[in-house]
Amino acid sequence: MPSAKYFPQEIIRRKRDGAELAAEEIEFMVRGITDGAASEGQIAAFAMAIFFRGMSMDERVVLARAMTNSGRLLDWRPAAMPGPILDKHSTGGVGDKVSLMLAPIVAACGGFVPMISGRGLGHTGGTLDKMDSIPGYRTMPDLDRFQQVVRTAGCAIIGQTADLAPADGRFYAIRDVTATVESIALLTTSILSKKLAAGLDGLTMDVKFGSGAFIPPIEGAVELAESIVTVANGAGLATTALLTDMNEVLGTSAGNAIEVREAIAYLRGEARETRLDTVTRALATEMLLLGDLARDATEARAMVEGALASGKAADSFARMVAALDGPADIVERATEHLPLASVVLPAAPERAGVITAIDVRKVGIVVMMLGGGRRRADDRIDHSVGLDAIAGLGEHVGPDRPLARIHARTVEDAQSAVAALRAAFEIGERAPLPGPVILRRIGGLP
């Protein structure tokens, strides 16, 4: 007869009352989540108990490992990869297309990047939706194909499959409908369960703060970054984190195919918005150091510059796209391959002046209104719509410089978006003092 402490309701009761759970109790709950022995009500109650009572760092390590071990673990050793297995994860934002440049940059520098990404939900965009805008590109290959592409192209950006951390998939779906997604402990373990399953040698986190971030307050972003770094390293995965600003759109575009075009222009050296460039290079530097591909930050930065200037990063992106059944000439002929919206309309401000503040969440919601994002997980999106030429803080806008250009399906959609976009921008007379794009680094020396 099993001990009462291994009944789900007793474990839930203990956590509800503030107890620190034993490793065996956490592992028992994860097995129940995976095999269906725990009911949805019990899983929801478990999540809510953690939401209010939290988890110690030791509990988080156990939970992350248990969810990792609920499915297949990628093993790169039989392939004898000639370089480290590295990845980056972002907590999400508006215009965050960093992964599209970062993975091929690191691949061009000798790393191997198996990037398992998510779709957008709410005001934040998803890397997977951006890749879905490339005709033919397979975002959900089987894991054997995924590993093959990483070996041959150096990087691959795909979605989470049912094989990897299946306990997290069920747990997250229940958390999503029970208002427990924002738990720092559960965010930490959800992110890391998939990264640990990917067999990484090193992970760099991009944790956003500001009006467009998933967790806007800087205090919450710091707490999440410290939790992820502590738990990841405790689970044996070398990890660092950068706290980056999301009080402006990252880059000059927001929307799926539009962001892919900006990423390709970046890789080709045609246009590199300063903030986007700063974040991309800093994260690439972290990854190269974690993988022991550079002796110090100076050498790592020089390697990043070399990968971009030589065109090797753009070549890595092209190889990845072709290997996953996208067009082989995507880098040279992006405009011909990527979908275009029927209507393009400048969004003029209500009055001329200087942009003093941006509610970036509202900018992301404009993209959703246009059809480029999801209100529910099963919504279909239009990859062609969105915004480009988005103005930044301190920039003068007026009749000759709109807030952005709107890409829409219809004139009516575009006109509605103009009114909504105006509400996201504050116009004044004096430019605000610029803040740092990267506020802080968390983690020991790689």
Image (spheres, rainbow, N blue to C red):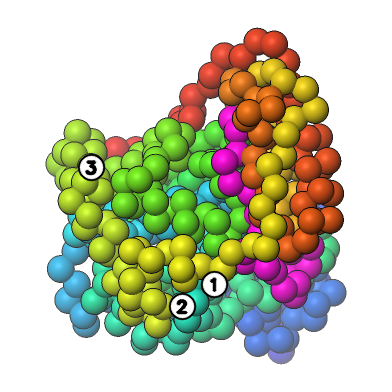
Quadrant where the C terminus sits is top left
Q: Secondary structure at mark 3?
A: helix
Q: Which one is in front, 129 or 405?
A: 405
For the record, the magenta segment spans: 372-392
Identified by mark 2, the residue type is Tyr
**Residue 438 drawn above or below residue 280:** above
Q: Which residue is mark 2?
A: 137
Which of the 4 quarters of the picture holds residue 277?
Answer: top left
Dots 1, 2 in contact, CB < 8 A: yes
Identified by mark 3, the residue type is Glu
Percent x, y of residue 35: 65, 87
Identified by mark 1, the residue type is Asp
Q: Which one is in front, 146 or 85?
A: 146
* Residue 123 is at least partly visible in this image: no
Is 386 in the magenta?
A: yes
Q: Which residue is mark 1?
A: 132
For label 2, the crowd category at 10 Å Cα-Cα, with few meaning under 14, some 14 to 19 and many 20 or more, is some
